[in-house]
Each structure stands twice: as structure tokens, then as C-alpha cells.
Image (spheres, rainbow, N blue to C red):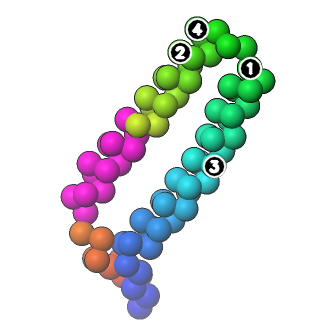
Amino acid sequence: MIEISLYVLLIIYAIALAGFFIFAIFNLYHLFNYGFLSFTSFFVTFLFLAGVVLILFITYQFGSQIDWSQTITF
């Protein structure tokens, strides 16, 4: 039998989140340096950042209720 702790999934999620933030920073950099500075670009950037904050808040709410020391047995 193989036992894997749930915190392994949390580490995988954190790595994926770090990769997402790296790509998001590149995208925002290119938007501000090479994109058109208009209301539309600022509005879309605001929607993007608001969506990211909303997703992070929801995942925190669900993730804080989980006992990460539990194990999954295969």
C-alpha cells in the first residue's frame, strides 16, 4: 500500500501557482510597455487581477478547511 500526504497536493498547487504568477508578470509587463494605454487595456487588466484575487480567495477558503496531514492510501 502506498500512502501520500495531502500536503503533496498543496506543494504541487503552489508550484503551479508560482508558474502562473511568473507568466502573469510577463504579460502585465508587456501590456504596460508595448500595449496601448487606453481605458480598455486598464479595464481588462483590472478584470484579470480581480479574477485572480477572487480565485485565490476561494481556494484559500476551501483549503483552510482541509486537514493537510491526512493521507491518501492506494
Quarter of the picture holding the N terminus:
bottom left
- In the depicted view, which residue is nearer to us: 31 or 65? 31
Residue 43 numbered tag: 2
What's the distance in space between the residues labelled 4 and 3, CA to CA?
25 Å
Image position, residue 19 (x, y; %): 61, 54
Q: Earlier in the sequence, mark 1 or mark 3?
A: 3
Query: Please, what secondary structure does the residue beneath circle 2 have?
Result: helix
Marks 1/4 in contact by CB < 8 Å: the verdict is no
Inter-mark Cα distance, 4 to 2: 6 Å
Q: Give the range drawn in magenta.
A: 54-66
Q: Which of marks 2 and 3 is nearer the N terminus?
A: 3
The circle on residue 39 is 4
Q: Do the residues labelled 2 and 1 touch (CB within 8 Å)?
A: no
Residue type, label 3: Ile
Residue placed at 48% from the left, 60% from the top? 13
- The answer to whether residue 72 is above or below residue 24 is below
**Badge 2 amino acid:** Phe
User: Secondary structure under badge 3?
Assistant: helix
Callout 1 secondary element:
loop
51 in magenta: no
Horizontal relation, residue 17 to residue 29: left or right: left
CA gap, disc 2 and disc 3: 21 Å
The answer to whether the residues at label 1 and label 3 have Cβ atoms under 8 Å apart is no
Where is mark 1, residue-wise?
35
The amino acid sitting under disc 1 is Gly
Q: Earlier in the sequence, mark 4 or mark 3?
A: 3
Calculate the distance from the C-alpha at mark 1 to the C-alpha at mark 4. Answer: 12 Å
Q: How crowded is mark 2: few (under 14 residues within 10 Å), some or many (20 or more)?
A: few
Q: In this view, does 25 lie above or below 69?
A: above
Check whether the beta carbons of the residues at disc 4 and disc 2 lie within 8 A of each other: yes
Residue located beneath label 3 in the image: 22
For the C terminus, the image quarter is bottom left
